[in-house]
Amino acid sequence: MIRIYYNNGRVLQGVVLAFGDRLVRVAIKDSDDAAEFRLVNRVWVSEDCEVVRLDFVEPPAPLECGGAGLLETLFPSELRPLPVPRVM
């Protein structure tokens, strides 16, 4: 998770899609397009050449599954793939 703070007070939330040496690509909440931010002279700059502050936020802790694995919680038992017997 990431928060993007603009100088005019606007704050956007999103998810980091890619993080490179001097580039961050973010899927912005409630937006159809991803945004890119570049690190220029130690400040992050938006595609519209606005200086922004990026705040990387830790995602919330995952919910407990009660002993079941992730696949077991996503698919009912009748839709789970059958184990493949090994011949060798």
Image (cartoon, helix red, strand yellow):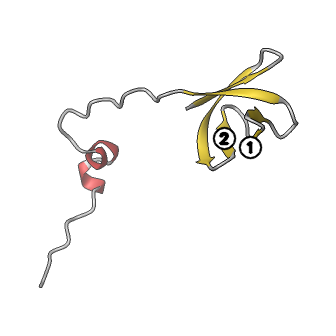
- The residue carrying pointer 2 sits among few (fewer than 14), some (14 to 19) or many (20 or more) residues within 10 Å by Cα, namely many
Residue 26 vs residue 40, the one in the foreground? 40
Query: Residue 63's x, y, as percent?
Result: 32, 29
Dot 2 falls on a residue whose secondary structure is strand
Q: Which residue is mark 2?
A: 26
Q: Nearer the viewer, residue 82 or 49?
A: 49
The circle drawn on residue 7 is none
As drawn, 51 above or below 20:
above
Residue reaching furthest to the bottom: 88
Occupied quadrant, residue 16 = top right
Residue found at x 80% / y 36%: 46
Tag 1's secondary structure?
Answer: strand
The amino acid sitting under disc 1 is: Glu
Which of the labelled discs sits on residue 36, or is there none?
1
Picture quarter containing residue 51? top right
Q: Quadrant of the C terminus?
A: bottom left
The spot of residue 59 in percent (x, y) is: 46, 30
Distance CA(mark 1)–CA(mark 2): 6 Å
> Hey, which quadrant is residue 39 in on the image?
top right
